[in-house]
Image: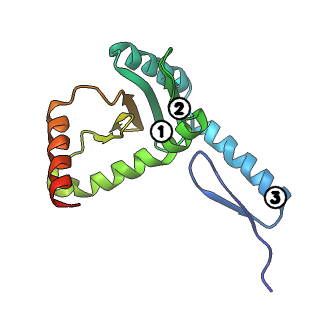
Amino acid sequence: MSEIQFHETCPNCGKIIVAGSKDKLAIDMLLHRKAHEAETSPGMDAKVAKFADEVLKSDPRIRYVGVVDYRLHVSVSKMRKDVRSLTSDEADRGYLQTAPNILIDVAEKLIPVLGLVESVTIRYEKLFMVLFRLESFTIVLTFEPTIVRPFMSALSESIQTLASRYLK
């Protein structure tokens, strides 16, 4: 007969912690979280927060900035003041923790053939998103969907017109 195992996924790095009892799992998770805290370099949180503030100052069209580190720890999730979020803070953090890195990872599969990925963009009906991967961080910026993107807007309209004509 197999022993009952308890497990929990670390929200920072996605590692699954397994233990033989709930008490042991709680202790192991606490130690794991403490290890994450110890990995954070002194002053980095302040630097990341300052970076986010400067990004928002740099362009009034940016509505949101998110920063996640290589361990998938959300360092910053910040909406511009006076801008209403389309999603909850919990949803933003959940998305930020996993999706940008997955999307960029997929795009980077072609690096050997096509070269480095500068950015990945996603155009939602209600939002335009740009993802950047830097050495230790992934940066997510969002904009209103009406932001001027001449090439992509014209291409999108053309594809939609042709699709409605031929693919329906």
Q: Which of the two labelled residues, at mark 1 and mark 3, occupies the earlier sequence position?
A: 3
46 shown above or below 160: above
Image position, residue 164 (x, y; %): 20, 53
Q: Amino acid at mark 1?
A: Asp
Three-letter amino acid code of the residue under disc 3: Lys
Any mark on residue 24, and which?
Answer: 3
Q: Residue type at mark 2?
A: Ser
Number of other residues with Cα within 10 Å of mark 2, as a class: few under 14, some 14 to 19, many 20 or more: many
**Residue matched to label 1:** 69
Disc 1 packing (10 Å; few <14; some 14–19; many ≥20): many
Q: Nearer the viewer, residue 123 or 133?
A: 123
Give the answer, above or below, for where 133 lies relative to 107. Answer: above
Q: Which residue is pictured at 36% across the width and 39% down the height?
A: 125
Of discs 2 and 3, which sits in the foreground?
2
Asked which secondary structure carries label 2, the reply is strand
Q: Please tell me whether mark 3 sits on a helix, a strand or a loop.
A: helix
Of the two numbered discs 2 and 3 on the same chain, state the one appearing first in sequence: 3
Q: Nearer the viewer, residue 77 or 8?
A: 77
- Which of the two labelled residues, at mark 2 and mark 1, occupies the earlier sequence position? 1
Q: Which residue is mark 2?
A: 75
Given residues 30 and 89, the one toward you in this image is 89
Residue nearer the viewer, 140 or 151: 151
Q: Is residue 102 left or right of residue 122?
A: right
Rounded to the nearest angstrom, the CA distance separating label 2 from label 1 is 7 Å
